[in-house]
Image (tube, rainbow, N blue to C red):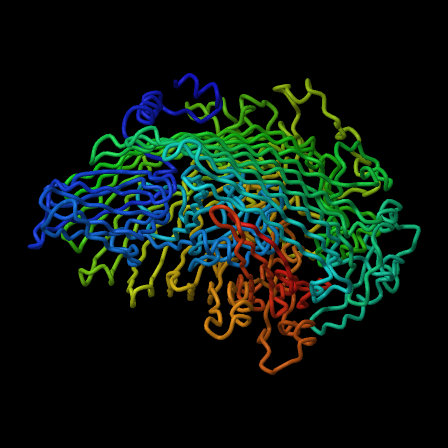
């Protein structure tokens, strides 16, 4: 078995053979546990008493599913206690019987995901053939466990208004959960891009955790896309039974999720044939225009599908399946880009001599030799012909300085699901489920406007699981599953111009990308960093968990193993990356006009084959200290194993070896200090992954639950524990870019039209295989490198919570919670080779001498992956819930919280570097402040109401008013924080991100009109660039953008249909952003840019109307 595992993942970091064998034997032959400890199930416990109040042993207790007749039976112990584990969610009946007592029967029990209600039984003396019936719902108050969770049942899943019918939005109903905006692979609303994160997936921050620290399970099986640790696609609502978010207090059975866990259970077949068919329609004729758009969204959206479930063998074998198709045809006129003005295109930069900003000094442009341009006029003889060709694809900006570009946003998504449940015998049940989703979103360019150029996507996801539950005895239950997830993705780009040579650039292109950036004051692009590429990832794992109940102890123990693989075929940097920062003339747009580069990079691409495995063991015990007090204690062993690559595309940098002049023995021409797998350093061989595994990581968990009054209506619960983050498989992707792998070469200066002019011998593209595989391969000098520290520490979160729950009347629940956590060893990337500013020279001279000022002259940028940042979160969370009864249910929550960190980025090495995870490489601690996803105040509520009819007020009035249902979701939260930044040229250190200087109050005291507010959101007159060589005095994320408020409403009417067994026809209308309230995005935040201080876009959408018809049976 160990040999098989090593063949399947041959370059996984070495696991000691004895540990590997023990893990495998544990998973297949002894009690173990993993990602899916409950399989999306619930539990029930209680105590049986006789009429005198004494405990009653040896009572037969039976739990029966009302829809499938699934049955589980146990005997009470000497303490009178009974326990059921791994119970499928659904409606149940509880029966207790013993000779000499009347049979006890309780109906109306509804079990939801991870529920563990206490159902005590009181026996009455009498004939066992006599039945005492009790109709009662399960208690609302949790009297066991310290977990804080929210559950959405199937009724609310189907009836609540969900924009796009995206189930992921339900997570935002949970206290402490906010969207993670503008993360890698997701847009400003947190939606997946369809390549790095699947369409339909959303990014969240739960209790201050980073967006990829949430665990997703579907039917108890792992449902994570391990490329970014995002969720795989969620099933469509009609196929889902329940949706649960656990935000805090997870036990030792749950790992790799410092933020939270999102658990989904799909519907299953029952003894009654059931299903539905539906069709949802949107059209631009019913929608409001975007606040900043001159035209409508030209939307046509159709979404149709069906579900069907029923018995194959009554009471034993059930099937359920479903299909949904989504068609979207849309053109959006809302892409706003900055562009070079008409005057600048003609070489007229005279306005820079007379700035309108009193804080900005006049700027005299100079030619590359240092001679001033008279009146800042650049003669046409110096213009770059290639730039002129490129600008022909960029319309001139409007009076606001922006270019508006229409974007085609067509999408086709198909989703299909099949699930089977089989009761082998009363002691053994099996189920299997498959979910597939092909999705494609092409982005053809409209006309020849490059501002409308966007990536297209194609991603097909496959998710499957097979699970088995066995009741070994009345006190011992086992659950096992195996899962497979596979997601091949492709990024597409419609480029009618072909490649960059079409504009006159002399280069050997390897891709169709355009990557041309103005990195100085202007901070905008003249081309999109896009290219056709493939990203394929897969994961496979299995788990087996056992639960043992004896006396006052409920013991769980187990383990899991998961293997992940990621293959990328990406001609990254294949057509060059071109930068202009103002070092030639003093202004980046003038540099671009004459084609004077600050930096040029070309490489053969990212081709990597990453592998990773994860394993864990745990043990936990829920100890009933008294009938009212339970203590939960557990320990999880969760070792870290490094991410490896089939081609050993990993490396580390050792400064002390650089100082000693020591080099790699694997790649002989690499600069000193770099070492690769197979190298020997201080007598030790550099391992696969270039870092050591950590086998001594243990995560204790402790919690308590106190039934304060003893009646199950008031509880006090709390707990704490340690949680480790699981690194995304994409983490080390950038290490494959550089020599000797992707062979990125970076040069300072040069001519845009012919970037290899004067360095022709460096143009080695396309690379031959013999050249690329030669141990004596010459390395570019200086080398632009990514590397990692030799000791990679696992990100660790210490979390705690305290909550009070109180049930009011029969159906109301109030909860108040305090949730806190502190994270350490968070990954970040910093440039170890940032140039040290020379205060005796000018800013322009510093830009021109950047390489000479670097501490390690053999290197250019030297980005190092480290694990030394911290974060913390503290939140007060209030929650109100009314269980559905008499046609009405309600949830409402308010969160007051604060999340702080040094950086909120937790993506790949390159994206952390590009995202400036440490804007000041000389002092990473300087930028401690509110997290990017900090939302100080959040209120969210949902309501479902079967409107009362006018019964008894006339036949006609009754007919008109019956069958109506209204549902709403209301969301209100504070704005997102942002930082006022300055040009990177201020610090003259490449990808640094200095902040601007504040010279007065940034907020306005007076009431202003909306137009004034949009034009100047904060007081830009009190902002200026920092002194050269400094990083500014404005704190990170010290300002907050506009708040967010949204109301969604659904109104439906249901009619009966004359179908056998009953049927319904539902007509439905939905309004998203019912009030058409524009929720504005943050303003432009870079000092000196054309949008500085201005708001030019919105979050979310303007009002959208949707209509639907649904037939159910």
Residue 709, quarter of the rendered image? bottom left
Q: Give how far across and how far down residue 440 sits, in percent.
A: 67, 40
Nearer-the-camera pick, 562 or 149 = 149
Is residue 889 positioned above or below 87 on the image?
Answer: below
Residue 19, quarter of the rendered image? top left
Quarter of the picture holding the N terminus: top left
Q: Is residue 110 left or right of residue 49?
A: right
Q: Is residue 650 left or right of residue 483?
A: right
Q: Give how far across and how far down residue 934 sits, in percent.
A: 49, 61
The residue furthest bottom is: 1006
The residue furthest right is: 381
| Residue 890 visible from this viewpoint | no
Q: Give how far across and how far down residue 706 sits, in percent.
A: 21, 57
Nearer-the-camera pick, 814 or 596 = 814
Q: Is residue 438 left or right of residue 1060?
A: right
Is residue 69 positioned above or below 670 on the image?
Answer: below
Nearer-the-camera pick, 743 or 582 = 743
- Total labels: the figure holds 0
| Residue 151 visible from this viewpoint | yes
Q: Is residue 397 left or right of residue 488?
A: right
Name the residue located 75 percent from the left edge and 53 percent from the top edge: 331
Name the residue located 39 percent from the left edge and 38 percent from the top edge: 35
Q: Give how far across and how far down residue 966 sits, in percent.
A: 52, 65
Nearer-the-camera pick, 930 or 673 = 930
Residue 795, quarter of the rendered image? top left
């Amino acid at each position: 078995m160990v040999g098989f595992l090593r063949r399947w993942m041959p370059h996984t970091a070495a696991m000691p053979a004895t540990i590997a064998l023990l893990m495998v034997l544990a998973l297949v032959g002894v009690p173990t546990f993993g990602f899916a400890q409950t399989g999306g199930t619930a539990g029930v416990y209680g105590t049986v008493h006789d009429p005198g109040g004494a405990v009653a042993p040896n009572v037969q207790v039976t739990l029966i599913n009302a829809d499938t007749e699934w049955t589980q039976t146990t005997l009470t112990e000497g303490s009178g206690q009974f326990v059921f584990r791994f119970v499928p969610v659904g409606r149940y009946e509880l029966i207790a019987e013993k000779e000499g007592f009347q049979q006890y029967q309780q109906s109306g029990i509804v079990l939801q995901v991870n529920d563990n209600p206490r159902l005590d039984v009181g026996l009455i003396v009498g004939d066992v053939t006599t039945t005492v019936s009790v109709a009662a719902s399960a208690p609302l108050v949790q009297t066991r466990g310290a977990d804080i969770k929210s559950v959405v049942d199937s009724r609310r899943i189907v009836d609540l208004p969900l924009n796009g019918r995206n189930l992921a939005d339900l997570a935002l109903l949970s206290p402490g959960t906010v969207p993670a905006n503008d993360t890698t692979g997701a847009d400003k609303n947190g939606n997946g891009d369809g390549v790095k994160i699947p369409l339909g997936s959303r990014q969240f921050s739960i209790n201050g955790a980073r967006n990829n620290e949430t665990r997703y399970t579907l039917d108890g099986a792992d449902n994570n896309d391990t490329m970014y640790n995002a969720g795989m696609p969620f099933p469509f609502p009609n196929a889902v039974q329940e949706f649960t978010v656990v935000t805090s207090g997870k036990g030792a059975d749950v790992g790799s999720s410092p933020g939270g866990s999102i658990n989904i259970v799909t519907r299953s077949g029952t003894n009654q044939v059931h299903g539905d068919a539906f069709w949802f329609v949107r059209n631009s004729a019913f929608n409001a225009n975007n606040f900043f758009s001159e035209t409508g969204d030209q939307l046509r959206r159709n979404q149709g599908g069906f579900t069907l479930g029923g018995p194959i063998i009554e009471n034993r074998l059930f099937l359920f399946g479903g299909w949904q198709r989504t068609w979207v045809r849309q053109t959006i006129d809302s892409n706003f880009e900055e562009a070079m003005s008409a005057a600048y295109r003609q070489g007229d930069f005279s306005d820079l001599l007379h700035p309108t900003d009193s804080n900005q000094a006049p700027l005299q442009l100079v030619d590359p030799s240092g001679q001033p341009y008279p009146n800042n006029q650049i003669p046409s003889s110096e213009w770059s012909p290639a730039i002129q060709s490129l600008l022909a694809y960029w319309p001139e900006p409007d009076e606001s300085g922006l270019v508006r570009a229409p974007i085609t946003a067509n999408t086709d998504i198909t989703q299909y699901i099949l699930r089977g449940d089989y009761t082998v015998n009363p002691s053994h049940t099996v189920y299997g489920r498959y979910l597939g989703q092909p999705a494609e979103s092409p982005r053809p360019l409209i006309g020849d406007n490059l501002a409308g150029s966007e990536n297209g996507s194609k991603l097909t996801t496959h998710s499957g699981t097979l699970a088995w539950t066995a009741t070994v005895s009345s006190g011992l239950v086992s659950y096992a599953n195996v899962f497979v997830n596979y997601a091949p993705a492709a990024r597409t780009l419609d480029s009618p111009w072909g490649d960059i040579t079409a504009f006159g650039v002399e280069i050997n292109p390897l891709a169709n990308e355009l990557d041309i950036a103005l990195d100085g004051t202007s901070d905008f692009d003249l081309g999109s960093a896009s290219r056709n590429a493939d990203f394929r990832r897969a994961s496979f794992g299995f788990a087996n968990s056992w639960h043992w109940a004896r006396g006052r102890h409920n013991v769980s123990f187990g383990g899991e193993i998961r293997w992940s693989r990621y293959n990328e075929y990406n001609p990254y940097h294949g057509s060059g990356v071109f930068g202009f920062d103002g070092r030639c003339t003093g202004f980046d747009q003038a540099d671009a006009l004459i084609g004077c580069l600050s930096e040029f990079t070309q490489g053969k691409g990212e081709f990597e084959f990453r592998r990773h495995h994860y394993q864990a063991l745990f043990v936990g015990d829920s100890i009933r200290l008294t009938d009212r007090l339970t203590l939960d204690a557990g320990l999880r062993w969760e070792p870290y194993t490094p991410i490896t690559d089939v081609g050993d595309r990993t490396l580390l940098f050792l400064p002390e070896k650089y100082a000693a002049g020591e080099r790699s023995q694997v790649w002989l021409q690499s600069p000193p200090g770099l070492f690769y797998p197979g190298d020997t350093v201080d007598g030790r061989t550099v391992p696969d992954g270039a870092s050591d595994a950590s086998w001594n990581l243990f995560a204790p968990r402790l919690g308590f639950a106190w039934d304060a009054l003893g009646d199950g209506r008031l509880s006090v619960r709390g707990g704490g524990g340690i949680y480790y983050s699981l690194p995304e498989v994409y983490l080390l992707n950038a290490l494959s870019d550089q020599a000797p792998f992707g062979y990125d070469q970076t040069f300072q200066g040069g001519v845009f039209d012919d970037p290899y002019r004067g360095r022709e011998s460096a143009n080695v593209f396309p690379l031959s295989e013999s050249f690329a595989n030669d141990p004596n391969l010459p390395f570019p000098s200086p080398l632009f490198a990514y590397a990692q520290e030799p000791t990679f520490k696992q990100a660790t979160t210490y979390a705690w919570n305290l909550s009070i729950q109180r049930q009011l009347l029969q159906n109301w629940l109030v909860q108040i919670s305090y949730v806190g956590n502190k994270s350490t060893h968070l990954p970040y990337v910093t440039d170890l080779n940032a140039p040290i500013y020379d205060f005796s020279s000018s800013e322009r001279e510093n830009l021109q001498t950047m390489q000479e000022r670097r501490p390690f002259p053999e290197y250019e940028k030297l980005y190092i992956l480290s694990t030394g940042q911290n974060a913390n979160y503290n939140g007060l969370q209030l929650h109100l819930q009314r269980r559905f009864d008499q046609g009405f249910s309600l949830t409402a929550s308010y969160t007051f919280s604060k999340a702080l960190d040094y950086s909120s980025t937790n993506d790949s090495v390159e994206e952390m570097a590009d995202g400036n995870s440490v804007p000041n490489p000389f002092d990473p601690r300087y930028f401690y402040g509110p997290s990017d996803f900090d939302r100080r105040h959040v209120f969210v509520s949902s309501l479902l109401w079967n409107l009362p009819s006018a019964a008894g007020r006339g036949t006609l009035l009754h007919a008109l008013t019956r069958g109506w249902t209204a549902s709403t979701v209301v969301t209100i939260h504070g704005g997102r924080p942002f930082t006022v930044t300055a040009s990177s040229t201020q610090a003259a250190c490449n990808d640094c991100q200095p902040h601007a200087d504040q010279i007065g109050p940034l907020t306005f005291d007076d009431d202003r009109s909306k137009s004034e507010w949009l034009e100047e959101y904060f007081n830009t007159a009190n902002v200026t660039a920092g002194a050269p060589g400094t990083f500014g005095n404005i704190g990170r994320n010290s300002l907050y953008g506009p708040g967010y408020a949204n109301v969604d409403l659904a109104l439906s009417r249901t009619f009966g249909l004359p179908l056998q067994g009953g049927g319904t026809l539902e007509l439905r209308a939905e309004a998203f952003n019912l009030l058409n309230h524009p929720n504005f995005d943050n303003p432009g935040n870079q000092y000196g840019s054309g949008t500085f201080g201005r708001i030019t876009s919105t979050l979310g959408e303007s009002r959208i109307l949707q209509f639907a018809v649904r037939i159910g049976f």
